[in-house]
Image (cartoon, rainbow, N blue to C red):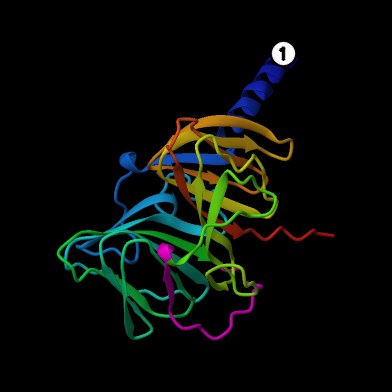
Amino acid sequence: MQRLIVIFLALATGLLAQDQKVYPTWLYRNLSALREYRIDVSSGSCHYTPIFGEGDVESRLPQTIARFGVLTLDPHGACQTVEYSRQEELYFVREGNGMVDYGGESHPVVPDDFTYLAPSVRHRLSNPSSQTLRVVVTTVRISPGTPISQAAPFAAANLSELQEQTVQGHPKSVLYKLLIGPRTATRDRINAAYAVTDFFLMDFAPAGTNFPHHHEVAEEIYLVLDGEGQMVAGGGLDGVEGLQPAKSGDAYYFRPNCTVGFYNQTKPALKAHILAVRAFVPMPQNQE
């Protein structure tokens, strides 16, 4: 009888272990393998392809980043109008010309434009042209404890306006264009965000790297725009890293404290460009 009880308990423990979900420290996706998913902005001519967050199979994993994906607008198409009281959005135009309706005013956007859309402002993306419009969109939750000021005017800029620069603590083999950062800072082209700590473009020289590192209170996404190399993705505070192949269209999500980095290939004249977003993740309060 005692032996039967021991066997039963062992089986029960095994079943419970199988039911428990163990979330990874990083996720990988490739754009070519992803499918359209309907969200609040979707219409017959506005199509959303999720990469991370809402619409992804591991949508519970990102904590502050609610959505990261691609909006594709058919010629003369338009998305639904939306407004988020405690979410901010970033647009990065990859292809085509469009219009952003923001707070009742219309603003044109062209390839390599990036925009910041503040919370509590009605906005809509449309495509008045005869060509397809593709935009990388990031939607970020703002912590309930963060006070929100009056919405700022529409803010947009183009990559061509920014000079590449090095960043302290990182090798000179990678140059940065700093796009959007916190509203309390002054270093980025647009300083307006509440939860977004960095939205930037990295230009890796052949054999260039930004060195493996981690962020304790931020989650991060890398989207490889062109080039190929090896992505660093590792677990936890122990700094253990693994190298994953990375090429154009690959995207990686990293949880807080996950080791992250990139090593570009060594072939001469072959650069790699990565679009990255980093968002603050509030630490849980200690309970007495």
Residue beneath the point at 64% across and 58% down: 281
With 250 as the anchor, is 94 left or right in this view? Answer: left
Residue beneath the point at 17% across and 68% down: 76
Query: Residues in magenta?
Result: 142-160
- Which residue corresponds to mark 1? 3
Outermost left residue: 130
Mark 1: few/some/many CA within 10 Å (<14, 14-19, 20+) = few
Give x and y (percent) for residue 272.
45, 42
Is residue 144 located in the magenta-colored stretch of the structure? yes
For the N terminus, the image quarter is top right
* Residue 156 visible here: yes
Q: Quadrant of residue 217?
A: bottom right
| Element under disc 1 | helix
In depth, the one of 58 and 124 nearer the eye is 124
In depth, the one of 107 and 48 nearer the eye is 107
Give x and y (percent) for residue 158.
41, 66
Give x and y (percent) for residue 178.
54, 61
